[in-house]
Image (cartoon, rainbow, N blue to C red):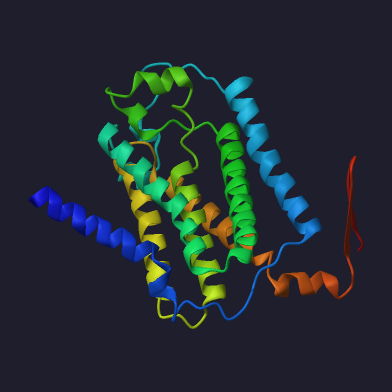
């Protein structure tokens, strides 16, 4: 009986969150604040695919960062004091919980499909893809360039599998936190621009960033990251999550259209972008 009751409650919550009918009045879009632009999206698309793709190839196929761990070479005393405060041993259960919270953060923006017209989905989807790829690519290249052992490596029960995979010294910055904050900033900004007068704005902001903060906290509690790793990931994710959608606003485009600074052309064999100073 208890299981049936819980199932009914969960089903009701899912219906409440996904049903467009609850958004019909308050969430009725009054404007189209974003638009795609050939030159802009070619630049952002190439940046995102280039950063994430090249990092993937260099890390997973070329293995340019595979350092052997020398046992006993790490001392807690070498870690900055503010990072020592939050150091923890590795916890696999908390690790998996953090995987769940970041996964929820990443899929949450899909809710825009229920509250925006279908002709806006391509614009929102393109912006979100660019946001993720750019944020992910930047954090991956920072990880490749900076060698920093994860907190769990300072304890005896570190996961040997992580050492064998070469992930043990990729602590900075926190990837989960970067993703979570990029998604939170994107969702909050896009929602506000579509529905500036909605009473749900604060709820969206607090919920999105609340899950992002929880993800960062769990990454520290699981022993995967230092506080500074999480802080850097939060800054990076938030910055990209706000910048990319802003670069699709009419306010941003007006800066260039006024002087016709950017021109783009596409042909079957490639594309060209011209920027006039």
| Residue drawn 69% across the image and 65% down it | 248
Residue 21, by quadrant, is bottom left
Q: Residue at x 36, y 34 (%)?
A: 151
**Residue at (44, 81) in percent of width and height:** 25
Answer with left or right where residue 13 lies relative to residue 235: left
Q: Is residue 91 visible?
A: no
In the image shown, does 199 or 269 lie closer to the viewer? 269
Q: Would you say 97 lies left or right of 229 here?
A: left
Q: Is residue 171 visible?
A: yes
Considering depth in this image, is 234 or 194 the residue closer to the camera?
Answer: 194
Q: Going 67% across and 33% down the picture, which residue do you hit?
A: 54
- Number of numbered discs: 0
Q: Residue furthest left?
A: 1
Q: Nearer the viewer, residue 167 or 17?
A: 17
Q: Position of residue 160 (x, y in %)?
A: 36, 18
Q: Position of residue 184 (x, y in %)?
A: 47, 59
Q: Position of residue 207 (x, y in %)?
A: 37, 64
In the rendered image, the vertical position of residue 219 relative to residue 195, given as above or below: above
Q: Is residue 62 above or below residue 134?
A: above
State the quadrant of the C terminus. bottom right
Judged left or right of residue 215, residue 111 is right
| Residue 100 % position (x, y) | 35, 44
Residue 224: image quadrant is top left
């Amino acid at each position: 009986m208890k299981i049936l009751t819980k199932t009914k409650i969960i089903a009701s919550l899912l219906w409440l969150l996904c049903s467009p009918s609850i958004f019909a009045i308050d969430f009725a879009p009054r404007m189209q604040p974003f638009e795609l632009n050939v030159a802009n999206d070619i630049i952002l698309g190439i940046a995102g695919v280039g950063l994430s793709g090249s990092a993937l190839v260099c890390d997973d196929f070329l293995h340019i960062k595979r350092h052997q761990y020398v046992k006993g070479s790490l001392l807690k005393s070498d870690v900055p004091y503010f990072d020592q405060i939050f150091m923890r041993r590795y916890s696999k259960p908390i690790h998996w919980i953090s995987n769940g919270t970041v996964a929820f953060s990443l899929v949450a923006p899909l809710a825009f499909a229920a509250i925006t017209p279908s002709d806006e989905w391509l614009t929102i989807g393109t912006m979100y893809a660019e946001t993720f790829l750019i944020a992910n690519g930047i954090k991956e290249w920072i990880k490749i360039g900076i060698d920093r052992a994860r907190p769990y490596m300072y304890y005896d029960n570190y996961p040997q599998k992580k050492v064998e995979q070469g992930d043990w010294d990729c602590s900075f910055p926190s990837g989960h936190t970067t993703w979570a904050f990029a998604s939170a900033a994107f969702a909050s900004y896009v929602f506000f621009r579509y529905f500036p007068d909605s009473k749900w704005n604060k709820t969206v902001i607090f919920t999105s960033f609340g899950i992002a903060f929880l993800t960062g906290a769990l990454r520290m509690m699981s022993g995967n990251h230092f506080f500074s790793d999480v802080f850097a990931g939060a800054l990076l994710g938030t910055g990209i999550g706000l910048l990319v959608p802003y670069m699709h606003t009419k306010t941003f485009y007006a800066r260039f259209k006024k002087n016709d600074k950017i021109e783009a052309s596409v042909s079957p064999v490639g594309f060209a972008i011209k920027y006039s100073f």
